[in-house]
Every structure is written in structure tokens, then in C-alpha cells.
Image: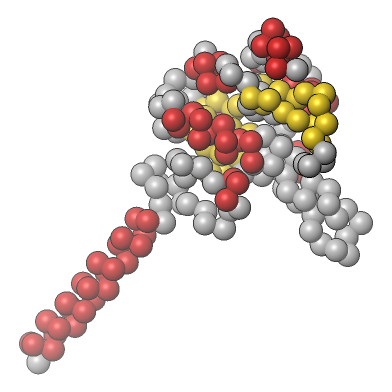
């Protein structure tokens, strides 16, 4: 009887030892759940993810300790709207050269992106990075990770959100599923020049 009991205990211990590595794999060192269902283009090397609503809640809980960065172009930041607390530091500049293969105007990298972020945040600061819908922000987080930032979160639904994919919807193809603008959190068209980091000379050279 005692032997059977020992076997049962060992069996549960064995199962638990299997579960622990799986649980650890499913979370990164900061305790944030990795989201394997994210498209590859939204994933980052740091594995830190939040939705727009979660990012706002994090900022609201400690506004002095959490910084929000909007890496869209200045044109998007101005004309589509932005989070009131977000710094605009473009990852890419919009050019006037049409890319026929991709069906949109070409964009050029901002060579000062990382250095401009460093003017506002340090490598251990908690930062939330946003673009239109999570792709450019993932690229930005990866660049920051290479530069030594360790707490950079990708806002996975961005400012505008993901496209409606319901073929029966009148709004199919429009970015109304989620995102900062569709989450019931504050956003604005009002511009604070102090929150914009932009090297005009570099931007003109890239164009």
C-alpha cells in the first residue's frame, strides 16, 4: 500500500515537472504572456505585448513611469489622430515615390530613431510602442531591443486597429475591429510640438 502511495506521489511530481517548463515557456521574464496567435509581423524579440486598452491602463496607473511612443509618420499622427500622451518619433518617413509592386508610396527609415527615443526614455523604462496596427511598432521594438531597451511593449492593435474581415459587413476592409481609436480610450487631433521628435533636415534628405 505504501509503495502504491509513493508511486502516486512520484507520478504527480513527474507531471508537475513537465508542466513547469511549459508554463515558463508561455511567459517571458517579465511575467507577460506570450501571444503565439499574433501574426509574425507583430511579434518582437522581447515578447512583450499589450492591446491599446491595456497600454492606456498601464499608463494611467503610473503616468510618470510609463511612456507611450507613436512611431507612425508625422502626417498620420496629425491627420488621423493620436493618443494625447504619445510622443511622435517616426520609424519611417513617407516619400513621394510610388512603389507599384506594393501599391503605396515608398517609405524610408529614420536614421535617428533610436537616438531620438533615448532623448526621452532610458533602457530600463517601461515604454509602449504604437503604429497603425502593430507592424511598424514591432519593428521599432526590435530596434530598441538591439539598442539595450528591455521593457518595450508592442501595442498589437495600434492606433487604427485591424481590418474587419467579415465578408457580410458593410465595413469589410476598414480598421474598426480594435485599436486605440476604437477602444474607448482618449485620443486627440491636438498637437503639442514638444511631444514630436523630428529632424526636418534628415526627413527632407530622405525624400
Looking at the picture, how far across and down is residue 89, in whole percent? 63, 21
Looking at the picture, how far across and down is residue 29, in whole percent? 36, 44
Query: What is the basis of the colouring in this image?
Result: secondary structure
Figure check: 57 above or below 26: above
Snapshot quadrant of residue 138: top right
Q: Residue at x 72, y 32 (%)?
A: 186
Q: Is 104 left, or right, of 28 in this rendering?
A: right
Q: Residue at x 34, y 55 (%)?
A: 24
**Front one among 8 and 109:** 109
**Front one among 62 and 176:** 176
Q: Residue furthest right?
A: 170
Q: Is 164 left, or right, of 138 in this rendering?
A: right
Q: Is 144 left, or right, of 187 in this rendering?
A: left
Q: Residue at x 48, y 25 (%)?
A: 65
Q: Residue furthest front?
A: 101
Looking at the picture, how far across and down is residue 73, in whole percent? 72, 25
Q: Residue at x 71, y 23 (%)?
A: 93
Judge whether residue 75 can be spotted in this image. Answer: yes
What is the total number of numbered labels drawn onto the structure image?
Answer: 0
Judge whether residue 193 can be spotted in this image. Answer: no
Looking at the picture, how far across and down is residue 101, in whole percent? 78, 42
Figure check: 66 above or below 167: above
Figure check: 194 above or below 148: above
Quadrant of the snapshot with the C terminus: top right
Quadrant of the snapshot with the N terminus: bottom left
Q: Residue furthest bottom?
A: 1
Q: Residue furthest left?
A: 2
Amino acid at each position: 500500500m505504501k509503495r502504491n502511495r509513493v508511486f502516486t506521489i512520484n507520478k504527480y511530481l513527474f507531471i508537475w515537472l513537465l508542466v513547469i517548463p511549459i508554463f515558463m515557456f508561455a511567459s517571458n521574464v517579465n511575467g507577460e504572456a506570450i501571444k503565439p496567435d499574433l501574426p509574425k509581423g507583430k511579434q518582437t524579440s522581447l515578447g512583450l505585448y499589450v492591446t491599446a486598452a491595456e497600454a492606456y491602463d498601464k499608463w494611467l496607473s503610473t503616468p510618470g513611469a510609463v511612456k507611450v511612443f507613436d512611431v507612425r509618420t508625422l502626417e498620420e499622427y496629425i491627420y488621423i489622430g493620436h493618443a494625447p500622451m504619445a510622443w511622435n518619433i517616426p520609424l519611417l518617413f513617407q516619400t513621394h515615390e510610388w512603389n507599384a509592386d506594393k501599391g503605396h508610396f515608398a517609405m524610408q527609415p529614420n536614421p535617428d530613431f533610436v537616438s531620438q527615443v533615448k532623448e526621452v526614455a532610458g533602457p530600463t523604462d517601461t515604454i509602449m510602442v504604437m503604429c497603425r496596427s502593430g507592424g511598424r511598432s514591432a519593428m521599432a521594438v526590435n530596434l530598441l531591443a538591439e539598442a539595450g531597451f528591455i521593457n518595450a511593449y508592442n501595442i498589437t492593435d495600434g492606433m487604427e486597429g485591424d481590418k474587419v474581415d467579415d465578408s457580410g459587413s458593410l465595413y469589410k476592409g476598414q480598421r474598426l475591429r480594435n485599436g486605440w481609436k476604437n477602444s474607448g480610450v482618449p485620443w486627440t487631433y491636438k498637437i503639442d510640438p514638444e511631444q514630436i521628435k523630428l529632424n526636418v533636415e534628415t526627413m527632407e534628405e530622405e525624400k
